[in-house]
């Protein structure tokens, strides 16, 4: 059952490794672009949901949502902050959808922002290393460690070459070359990825997403075919669903299964009334290259062991059967935790509206899918949009 | 309710979040073992507050990695293995990079992973088959 909610405006700042602007400025800039894109007066916004993951770890001030509401002139709007580690952006988006769908807000503004360069590398790395279970932390286990274990298991079980992972990185970098908001716009080839330094074997530097600064936002409204000015009201939110899964990664029955991904995917396809085959373009949470492959399989886009073959065959390239991460993904667009899930929605709305240059457009896309994942899959947040 | 005002009983192994790496929890009723703390036994629902701590003997490697880019204070390289000890599954440090999926392993020795804290843990080594 599709919702009656439409994404009426989108906007984002460029994602960067070291932005000169403070967090509040990044958030406000994305919000203002989005309100302008939607043609919405700030005073008409009923609800603001602000996604940010690391404020406490980076000593940012509390009450971020309230400060943003004041800065934007959202007169009397309700406001709160959403935190769900690396899936913060998508969770904030879902809260906004729920508000508009339930009728407790007519217009919701959802903003996600992160400034990971605000802390020194040591404190950010330490904060991220504490996202795992305390007994995992005690062993020095990190998110890239899970990526290394899963990547080794994937290559081993499916008898896949190391190039299978590198091809994901090369494809996502290629997609970012023409995306002006992407952090890395430099093409890399499979050999570059294979030559980069080892992070957690067999994963190398170019298999891992960067740390990023940036913000992304959307305006959500109730569905009407046109607004008062006769503009189309924007893509419809066909379904949202999320699910938690095993927190301690080792306890998963299979290192290549992420039950939160599978469950959230089944739920969102059910709610949207579609099957994976109906999806024209997808944003997949590629914090590590191997995650793009595992998620594509867990979600039912490919049978187990087939996503790497599809990637090498070009199926997931911009001109393939299922373009994946047309904006560059976390790998090349960047991964500012609180903004990432919203940047996926922004990218998909641009694709569905068709307002992108030919160099990076998925022609005729009508159904779009996004998955934003917390940790190494302890929570997955899925969205389906229809043009 | 026994124990502290946090609601977490202070008796039993469950109160010890700093168990050495070679220790699992074991249910006081059915003996089911688990590694990552939980409130209740997954099989019989007995409170984990009454669980004992038991030493893990021999397990089988499922996957391995060697982490070169380690978090602050963690010594590099950090060899890690995902290992199954029957129903218990865990990720722990290995003494060397020579383990492969399917290998039998046990915990051995005493190793300090992080500079600073004086915590030490046994690490995984290949087990001699008897
Ligand atoms: Zn029991």
Image (cartoon, coloured by chain):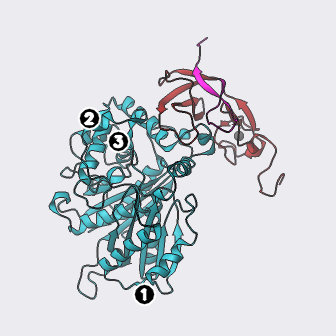
For mark 3, what is the residue?
A: A206
Whether residue A323 appears in this view of the structure is no
Give the residue displayed 53% in from the left and 50% down from the top: A128
Could you say where residue A353 lies in the image, as x and y percent from the top left? 23, 69
Total label count? 3
Residues under labels 2 and 3: Cα distance?
10 Å
For mark 1, what is the residue?
A: A43
Q: Colour of chain B?
A: red
For mark 2, what is the residue?
A: A191
Judge whether B18 appears above or below A54 on screen: above
Rate crowding at label 1 as few (under 14), some (14 to 19) or many (20 or more) other CA atoms within 10 Å: few
Quarter placement of the C terminus of chain A: bottom left
Circles 1 and 2 in contact, beta carbons < 8 Å: no
Reply yes or no: does residue A368 show up in magenta: no
Give the residue displayed 63% in from the left and 36% down from the top: B115
Judge whether B64 appears above or below B70 on screen: above
Position of residue A263 in the picture relative to residue A235 (left or right): right
Q: Colour of chain A?
A: cyan
Chain letter for mark 1, please: A
Reply yes or no: does residue B113 show up in magenta: yes
Residues under labels 1 and 2: Cα distance?
52 Å
Q: Earlier in the sequence, mark 1 or mark 2?
A: 1
Judge if badges 2 and 3 mark residues of a common chain: yes
A124 or A268, nearer to the observer: A124
At mark 2, the secondary structure is helix
Span colored in magenta: B109-130
Position of residue A229 in the picture relative to residue A149 (left or right): left
At mark 1, the secondary structure is helix
């Amino acid at each position: 059952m599709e919702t009656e909610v439409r994404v009426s405006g989108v906007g984002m700042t460029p994602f960067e490794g070291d932005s000169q602007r403070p967090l509040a400025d990044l958030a406000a800039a994305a919000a203002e672009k989005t309100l302008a894109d939607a043609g919405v007066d700030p005073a008409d916004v009923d609800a603001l949901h602000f996604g940010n993951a690391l404020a406490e770890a980076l000593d940012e001030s509390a009450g971020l949502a309230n400060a943003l509401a004041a800065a934007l002139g959202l007169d009397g709007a309700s406001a709160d902050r959403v935190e769900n580690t690396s899936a913060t952006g998508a969770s904030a988006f879902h809260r906004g959808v729920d508000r508009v769908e339930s009728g407790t807000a007519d217009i919701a503004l959802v903003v996600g922002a992160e400034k990971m360069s605000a802390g020194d590398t040591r404190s950010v790395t330490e904060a991220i290393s504490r996202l795992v279970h305390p007994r995992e932390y005690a062993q020095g286990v990190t998110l890239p460690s899970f990526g290394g274990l899963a990547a080794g298991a994937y290559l081993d079980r499916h008898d896949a070459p190391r190039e299978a992972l590198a091809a994901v990185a090369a494809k996502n970098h290629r997609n970012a070359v023409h995306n002006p908001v992407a952090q890395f716009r430099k093409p890399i080839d499979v050999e570059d990825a294979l030559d980069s330094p080892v992070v957690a074997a067999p994963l190398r530097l170019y298999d891992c997403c960067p740390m990023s600064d940036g913000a992304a936002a959307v305006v959500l409204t109730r569905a009407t075919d046109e607004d008062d000015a006769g503009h189309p009201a924007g893509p419809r939110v066909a379904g949202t669903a999320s699910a938690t899964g095993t927190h301690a990664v080792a306890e998963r029955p299979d290192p290549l299964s992420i039950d939160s991904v599978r469950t959230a995917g089944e739920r969102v396809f059910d709610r949207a009334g579609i099957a994976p085959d109906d999806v024209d373009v997808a944003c997949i949470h590629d914090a590590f290259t191997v995650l793009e492959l595992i998620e594509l399989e867990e979600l039912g886009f490919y049978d187990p062991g087939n996503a790497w073959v599809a990637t090498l065959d070009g199926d997931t390239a911009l001109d393939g059967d299922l373009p994946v991460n047309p904006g560059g993904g976390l790998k090349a667009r960047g991964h500012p935790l609180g903004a990432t899930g919203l940047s996926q929605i922004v990218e998909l709305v641009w694709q569905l509206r068709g307002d992108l240059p030919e160099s990076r457009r998925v022609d005729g896309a009508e159904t779009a899918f996004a998955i934003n994942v917390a940790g190494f899959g302890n929570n997955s947040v899925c969205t389906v949009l229809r043009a | 309710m026994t124990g502290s005002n946090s609601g977490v009983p202070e008796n039993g192994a469950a109160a010890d979040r700093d168990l050495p790496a070679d220790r699992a929890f074991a249910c006081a009723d059915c003996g089911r073992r688990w590694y990552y703390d939980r409130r209740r036994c997954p099989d019989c629902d007995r409170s984990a507050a009454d669980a004992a701590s038991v030493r893990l003997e021999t397990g089988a490697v499922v996957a391995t990695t060697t982490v070169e880019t380690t978090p602050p204070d963690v010594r590099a390289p950090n060899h890690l293995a995902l290992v199954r000890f029957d129903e218990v599954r865990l990720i722990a440090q290995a003494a060397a990079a020579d383990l492969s999926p399917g290998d039998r392993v046990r915990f051995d020795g005493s190793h300090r992973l992080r500079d600073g804290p004086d915590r030490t843990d046994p690490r995984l080594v290949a087990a001699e088959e008897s």
